[in-house]
Image: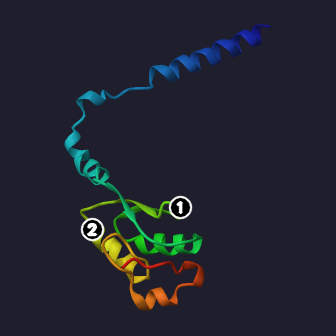
């Protein structure tokens, strides 16, 4: 019984002792100028934009999303029912028009750019749609 009491007291001491050393540094007095470059790197501004892109199927989805993924694009998700591509990108690295031109280059029409005719003709039959005039 005496051994059990000693073990309990020892464990209790360890727990209390470790909690008392939990915060030995006063972070309110830290020099934040040393971390300013890190915080600037993590504070990149992103823009979310929705663009109409014509297509029909899941193959179109794969082609469109792959073409949209340029340097600076964090997310590209195309919905085949609504024909909308949702982009999350860094406007300091890439422009919306440049992304749309890449999509048009693989044969898909966007709001601003008509898909490349040669690329369109090479698309699978299921991917070919009534092209806008």
Give the mark, 1 or 2, whose residue is nearer the N terminus. Answer: 1
Q: Is residue 95 visible?
A: yes
Residue shown at the point (57%, 20%) measured from the top left: 15
Mark 1 neighbour density, 10 Å: few (under 14) some (14–19) many (20 or more):
few
Q: Give SS at disc 2.
A: loop
Q: Nearer the viewer, mark 1 or mark 2?
A: 1
Farthest residue to the bottom: give it: 118
- Report the quarter where the N terminus lies: top right
Tag 2 residue: 95
- Residues at marks 1 and 2, CA–CA distance in whole angstroms: 25 Å
Mark 2 neighbour density, 10 Å: few (under 14) some (14–19) many (20 or more):
some
CB within 8 Å, label 1 to label 2: no
| Vertical arrangement, residue 111 with respect to residue 33, above or below | below
Tag 1 residue: 81
Q: Position of residue 37 (x, y in %)?
A: 24, 51
| Vertical arrangement, residue 25 with respect to residue 86, above or below | above
Q: Is residue 94 visible?
A: no
- Report the quarter where the C terminus lies: bottom left
Q: Quadrant of residue 111?
A: bottom left
Q: Quadrant of residue 53?
A: bottom left
Residue 31 relative to residue 104: left or right: left
Residue 21 relative to residue 1: left or right: left
Numbered label tally: 2
Residue 58 relative to residue 39: left or right: right
Residue shown at the point (47%, 64%) measured from the top left: 83
Q: Position of residue 24 (x, y in %)?
A: 37, 26
Q: Depth check: give the residue in front, 105 or 41.
A: 105
């Amino acid at each position: 019984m005496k051994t059990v009491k000693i073990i309990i007291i020892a464990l209790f001491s360890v727990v209390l002792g470790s909690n008392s050393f939990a915060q030995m540094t006063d972070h309110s007095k830290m020099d934040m100028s040393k971390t300013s470059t890190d915080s600037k790197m993590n504070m990149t501004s992103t823009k979310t934009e929705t663009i109409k892109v014509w297509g029909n199927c899941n193959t179109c989805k794969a082609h469109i999303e792959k073409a949209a993924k340029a340097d600076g694009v964090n997310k590209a998700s195309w919905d085949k029912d609504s024909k909308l591509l949702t982009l999350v990108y860094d406007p300091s690295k890439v422009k919306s028009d440049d992304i749309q031109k890449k999509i048009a280059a693989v044969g898909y029409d966007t709001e601003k750019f008509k898909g490349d005719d040669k690329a369109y003709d090479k698309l699978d039959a299921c991917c070919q749609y009534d092209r806008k005039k």
